[in-house]
Image (cartoon, rainbow, N blue to C red):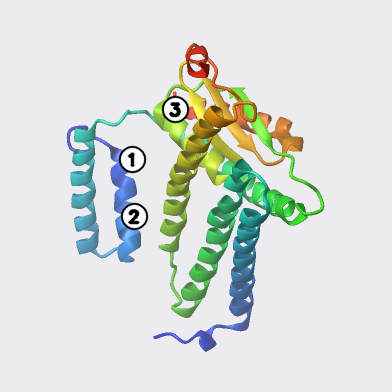
Amino acid sequence: MSHLTDLPAWAAIAVCGLLLMGAAMTLIGSIGLLRLPTFYDRLHAPTITTSGGTILVCFASMLCFAVLQSRWIFHEVLIIVFITVTTPVTLMLLGQASLYRHRFEKPQDVPLKQGPHAEKDRE
Amino acid sequence: MRAWFPYPLLSTALLLMWLLLKQSVAPGTVLVGIVLSTILAWVLLKLQPPRSHLRRLGHFARFGLHVIADIARSNIAVARIILRSRRQPVRSGFISVDLDIEDENALALLACILTATPGTAWLEHDRREKKLLFHILDMDNAYTWRQTLARYEASLKEIFQ
């Protein structure tokens, strides 16, 4: 087991900074989820958490364990890659479902479907 | 060569992922990784995904750097909007743009980028009309986002031709 007290001061400061910034980003994302008024606005808030927050926290972890074990550590990059690739699926699904529902219930609030099928859908 | 490695890029990516997960480059690990990535590429061949050819990997790297810079910038911008949202109501809205990309993999990549970027959310793409509907959090920057999207479109077309 490695001990966190072995971390030199410069690395400790950098790791703390990255962790705090990442945590702040995640907190801001959550605040946004709470504060923003409409569903489409709220779609944007969690992306801060998944992009900014995750990346900063993963960098902090990489730096911390790379310095402690004095070797390069890259496998946190996989977390960043997989989260970036999988989040869009959920968000697009939510966005499309909400768009479909709003077009049905309150068509004046959202842009209508364009193209040849539009007339048929509106009836 | 094609018969053995139907998806060279995918196989390379899988091998890289395997090595990262195992955290070693010992000959045994590399060998198992190569076997696994080759077999998984054959499995994918059975699924017959749409194939596209990447050109100009140098352009691809530059495009990636641009995207990372844009994501970092919009992270800060959206954080500011959320923190200000009590005093200053959010002006969000829908934008519809013409998007002349046919390649499915390029579209998937663009969807990932637009959704991973805070402040933009991909909503609907009409393949027949070639129109993309997306939602942005800051309508004051609508013009900038249109320009960014046009830049992405040009780069993706160049890479996926």
Q: Amino acid at mark 1?
A: Leu
The tag earlier along the polypeptide, 2 or 1, is 1
Q: Are marks 2 and 1 on the same chain?
A: yes
The tag earlier along the polypeptide, 2 or 3, is 2
Find disc 2 in the rendering and name its residue: B17
Find residue B98 and report its image quarter: top right
Disc 2 sits on a residue from what chain? B
SS of the residue at dot 3? loop
Q: Position of residue B145 (x, y in %)?
A: 67, 34
> If the image is split into quadrants, where does the C terminus of chain B sit?
top left
Mark on residue B101? none
Find residue B19 and report its image quarter: bottom left
Query: In the rendered view, would you say B91 is above or below A83?
Result: above
Residue lying at 59% horizontally and 62% vertically, measured from the top left: A26
SS of the residue at dot 2? helix
**Mark 2 and mark 3: Cα distance apart in space:** 24 Å
Q: Position of residue B59 (x, y in %)?
A: 52, 35
- Callout 2: 10 Å neighbours few (<14), some, many (20+)? some
- Callout 1: 10 Å neighbours few (<14), some, many (20+)? few
Mark on residue B9? 1
Q: Mark 2 near mark 1, Cβ–Cβ under 8 Å?
A: no
Disc 1 sits on a residue from what chain? B
Residue lying at 63% horizontally and 70% vertically, measured from the top left: A20
Q: Amino acid at mark 2?
A: Met
The tag earlier along the polypeptide, 3 or 1, is 1
Find disc 3 in the rendering and name its residue: B160
Q: Are marks 3 and 1 on the same chain?
A: yes
